[in-house]
Amino acid sequence: MLSSIKWPFLSSSSSEEKKPTPHPHIQPHKPIQTKYVSLPVDIPPSFLSLTPDPALVPDAKPITFHPLDWTSTAIPENKGKLAFILENVLSPSECGQLIEYAEESVPLDSPTAASGANNGPWSPALVNMGPGFELYEPSYRRSDRIIWDTKEVADRIWERCLSVEGLRREIEVIQGHERIKKVTGRGEWHGDGGRGRWVMRRMNERLRFLRYEKGGFFQPHCDSAYYASMDKEQVVKTLLTVHIYLNDCKATAEDPDSTELVGGATTLFSSDEKRRYDVECKAGRVLVFQHSAVLHSGDEVKQGVKFSVRSDVLYFSFPDVVS
């Protein structure tokens, strides 16, 4: 579920003037019960292998990693909040193939697929209202989506991310009262912060593929945790957001005609939304940041189509360990 939601349909906005594509099964402002089913997709063992075969993936490049230095941005007060950027986790050709596999995973008789506007397996992205219910709010979030539950692909992508020097060390264990409070946003009197440590488990197998056409956007928000288990002895929930960009939103100096996409950056905001830091889309780039207190948006796409994937990182809690 999203937190810090500002419902723009209750106030005037220039975005409201754009008319979203109608959908015969999904009506704006009306909660709907949703259930997602993914078809099996035959994924070759070589696809997204830890070490790509140059003969199969000639456009693969070495993965690089760097923590986001908040103090060098316009929002230095975010210092201490987890945020990282990885480059070349996927090659451009793998990004394209991944989209094709995602499209194959959608049952076309699904009530939320095939919008009647030649969208094929893509359906409007919804806003989570709680377990099993979502809301279509095109003045708040405007894009199409495919939800593909695939542990196999999620594990392969995450294995690549963790293969680069530095990331695992930064995120594998979250412990110590102050750090837990900074990352989770919850102190010792609010349950989670009182737990001795959180240990990374894996990337969530639920991959949300997003397609933003011209005029598509996602208004500023903070992400909230998905709870996989609420056992008294151990909680399993997500703490980190993962954004995987599948195409470029800026042409490169080497190939100025390499993209048709303009706009669509992920913008990280100050709490008053007056200051910002943009993370541009780049095929194969991965942005990882904590759910708590990182206000962000998907900038409006001015030209072309943006493709990305959204997931999260699951953690185990260990309340019996003294921090």
Image (cartoon, rainbow, N blue to C red):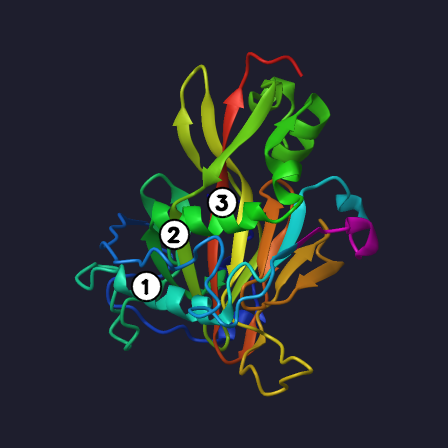
Q: Is residue 43 visible?
A: yes
Mark 1: few/some/many CA within 10 Å (<14, 14-19, 20+): some
Real-space Cα distance between discs 2 and 1? Answer: 10 Å
Q: Secondary structure at mark 2?
A: helix
Q: Is residue 124 above or below residue 188?
A: below
Residue at image mark 1: 101
Q: Secondary structure at mark 3?
A: strand
- Residue at left offset 52%, top offset 41%: 224
Q: Is residue 231 above or below residue 65?
A: above
Residue 312: give its label.
3
Mark 3: few/some/many CA within 10 Å (<14, 14-19, 20+): many
Q: To which quarter of the image does residue 177 belong? A: top right
Marks 2 and 1 close (CB-CB < 8 Å): yes
* 29 horizontally vs 169: left or right: left
Magenta range: 65-75
State the residue in front, 78 or 52. Answer: 52
Real-space Cα distance between discs 3 and 1? Answer: 20 Å
Q: Is residue 5 visible?
A: no
- Where does the C terminus fall, quadrant-wise? top right
Mark 2: few/some/many CA within 10 Å (<14, 14-19, 20+): many
Residue 52: give its label.
none
- Residue at left offset 82%, top offset 50%: 71
Residue at image mark 2: 153
Q: Secondary structure at mark 1?
A: helix
